[in-house]
Structures are given as C-alpha cells and as structure tokens.
Amino acid sequence: MRPVLAPAAAAALDRAAQERGVRAEDLMERAGAAVARAAVELAGGAYGRRAVVVCGKGNNGGDGLVAARRLARRGVRPAVLLLAPPEALTGPAVRNLARLAEVGIRAVPFSAPLLERELSRADVAIDAIFGTGFRGRPEGPAAEAIALLNGSGVPVVAVDIPSGVDGETGAVPGEAVRAAVTVTFGAEKAGVVFPPGAELAGVVEVADIGFPPDLVVSDVAVVEREDVAARLPARPLDAHKRATGVVLVVGGSRRMTGAVRLVAEAAYRTGAGLVTVAAPEGALMALRPALVEPTYLPLPETEEGTVAAAALDVVLEAAPGFDAVAVGPGLTTHPEAVRVVEGLVRGSPAPLVLDADGLNAFAGRAGEVGARRAEAVLTPHAGECARLLGTTSAEVGADRLGSARKLAATTRAVALLKGPRTLSVDPGGQVRVNPTGGPVLATAGTGDVLTGIIAALLARGLPPLDAASVGAYLHGLAGSLAGLELGEGTTASDVAAAVPDAFAAVREP
C-alpha cells in the first residue's frame, strides 16, 4: 500500500529525517532537482525554453529556488518572482536565494503585470507558493498569482501540492492552482489524494529525496492491486458450497425488491457458495422469479408489506448457520423494521454488513451499533453518515476522513464511507483509500452491489477491514470494466456481472 501523509505527518517526517542526520539543505536540493526534471519534461526540453517560478516564503518557495537554479544550469531561462520580501525567507531558502547569483539569476518581487508578461512567453511554470501546511483561502498577491497561473494556459508543475489546496482534506475553499504535474516528496500527501484537491494535482509524481524508508509510514494508505491480490481468498480443490461462504441477506419490502436482488447477485458473483434472502413474503413473490440461485426465508410482514417485529426471532434463529449477514437494503424505516434491525445487530453471532435502512435505523444513535456480539462493516454514503453522526452531508463532505474515523470509533466497527476515493476505516484509525471506480458508479443500486461483495468476502473469511477495502477495490474495478463496454448506460446489474472480470484482472500476474 502507498502511504499518504497529512501535513503533521509530513512535518514529523522532515524532523525525524534530520534527527537521523539528513540535512535540511540536502532534502531541499533533491526536492528542487526533482521539480526541475519534471519542468523540463513538461516543457519538452531544456535549452532555450522559458520558465516562470513563483515562490512563497517557506520551504516550498525554497524548493522553487533550487529548481530555478538547476533549470538555468540546463539552459532554461527562468524568471523568479517572490511573493514575500527576501528577509521573510528562513532556513535553507535564504541560502538558495543567494545561490541564484551562481547562474546569473535575480529574483524579483511579484507584481501581477510582471507575472502576466513572463507567462505570455513561458513554456512551463512552477508553483512554489504554498506547501501542505497551508489552510484557508489564498488572499492578496498569492490569490492574484494563482489566478494568473490558471488563466495563462501555461502548464504548471506544483511543488508538493497545488497552492490553495488544503493539505489535510483536499478541500479548495478559494483560488487553487490547476497543475499538470505535482511533484511530491517521500509519499503522497492527503491533499492530492482526496478530491477536489486530487482533481487539481494532475499527474502526481512521488520523488525520493532521501528520507529513510523506515520513517515513511502512515496510518492512511492507498490500496494497490497487489494488496488486493494477496488478500483474495482461494477456493480449495475440495471446496463445497458451505465451505466457500454462506451469506444471509435481510432486507426488502413489498415495494422495494431490487436492492436485495442486487445484494444476492453480487454475493454470488464474489464467490459465495450459498446465499439466502430473508424478506417479507410479499417481496419474495417478486424476487423468486427474478433470481433463482438463492434460497429464500419468508418473514412475517406488516400490512404495509415491510418486515414485522416478529421477524426478529425468525432471523436470529437462522443466523448461526451463516458466515455473514447483510442487513438493510430495501428494508424501510418502518418502526417494526427498525426493531428488527436493532435486535439483529445486538444478537447476530455472524459478522454484519449494515447498509441503507440498516444504517438509517440508528440515525442519531450511532453509538448503539457498538452494542453487538459480532464484527461489523458499515457502508454509508455521505448522507447516511451524516444521519448516523447527527450532522450534515456538507460537514461530512468537508472532512470525509475525519467523519469516517469518527463513525468507526463511535460504532466500534469498520466504516466504509462511499464516494470519490472511498475510505475504509477501522476503529483504531487505520485508513485505506480506494483508487478504483468513477462516475460510472453514479447509478441506482451500485451501493447494493458493494454490500453483496463485502458480505461475500466476510463470509469467505476476510477480516472486516480487508473485506471492506478489497470489496471497494473490486467494486470500483468492476464498474470501470463494465463502463468500458457500456459507457453511461452501465447499470448496477452490469457492475455485479463484471465482478468476476475484476477478480481476473486483479489476479493477472
């Protein structure tokens, strides 16, 4: 997995490396060299090309000064503009400002007309304004510089992170640089992993600038194909249906049968040996002809066609025979359905996947999910997460990582927060970031498919965090594979059907 560093972790890495004897000057020199290489590649060459380097006052600006010097040594003609007076620079940046004289360059104070003129003849620009520690809205000359860079049409190399992007969350509260390439150091930074910052970073290149490898660690990591392949369960030669995962799906109502059908289908496509659908009899009448593979467990129903409270005893009696239980899709929030969910969460001996109305049953009462016997994976989107935590979707969206961590800690469960860069978080704060998927999944029912995938992986023996993160990866990959053939017409059923192709793609050597 690829580690992802928040600003505090990145600063701690710098300090720890220096305590090991790595000089700050050497780190800055290597960082600037990596930025210069990226700029030459983006400009299509070195000799005779023109570059504009816009520098702030911190280490980010110092990296830009090194890049300017190195570009000049390669025959590039750089113009260096400072957004702060020279006396505001600190540490190695001061020395690197002085070293520009070695190549006959003089840094000049920023002005909008000057930057506009230099950009009009530049082949490449370097954004060395703000680093990962910046938060808030750029103002004054910095905001002017960012707007001019974005409006110039000149390709931009961002140093560590596009200026104006929040290094902690990826939020963009004001002006932010749109980079063609972002050169980041040691490990990816959170601001270029999480949207919308990720969308402004362009191609992200991680440069090795000499950090001791054992120091580059984080509790946040991006899942890679090799990680998924190593965790996929294998079927033994003597496998039988009850040895490859038995899944119970509790959901559905008379008017909502599609969700449980998708969960069951996805569980089978993920390799579950046996799937049983427990639903009100009125729902089963529609389900049986549509999906012939599962077995069915009729549940008592209310006059409205939802599960009745008496269904709880039926489900709890059956639950010990299953390796995983998926709860919620199509269930409704009828008071009796809520009672069934509450009792099942408290009493199920089998690991749980809670989705949709399995989550809504605990709106504003997330802590009650922690009062259970078995492990659990929660799969909310932003709205469901907000209802559980008693907040708003906007607040969840503004800090997805913080919200997912809070939900996992509050419920003592693995929280999978769906959305761009789906997050899987365990109660201890370990975070896995999913890189697969995209807009093709923005269609009804794809969340139900994910629930079925995770339930099957739990049933096949994966621990909850692995089931969630591997499931998210396979789900996103299946969506992309289906989308290659069907484009915007891809449906949730198409995604479920593509899950075996996702398995095959992951297992390819």
Image (tube, rainbow, N blue to C red):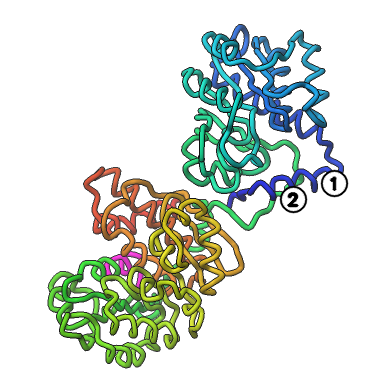
Instruction: Magenta stretch: give its range.
Output: 264-272
Report if residue 311 lies within the magenta region: no
- Which residue is disc 2 drawn over? 215
Q: Does label 2 or label 1 sit earlier along the sequence?
A: 1
Q: Residues within 10 Å of mark 1 (few under 14, many from 20)?
A: few
Residue at 75%, 49% in the rendered image: 12
Find residue 20 and name its label. Answer: 1
- Could you tell me which secondary element the residue under label 2 belongs to? helix
Q: Is residue 367 left or right of residue 99?
A: left
Label 1 near label 2: C-beta < 8 Å? Answer: yes
Residue at 24%, 53% in the rendered image: 491
Q: Residue furthest front?
A: 140
- Could you tell me which secondary element the residue under label 1 belongs to? loop
Q: Is residue 167 left or right of residue 15?
A: left
Residue 441 against residue 207 in the figure, above or below = below
Q: Residues within 10 Å of mark 2 (few under 14, many from 20)?
A: some
Which residue type does callout 1 highlight? Answer: Arg
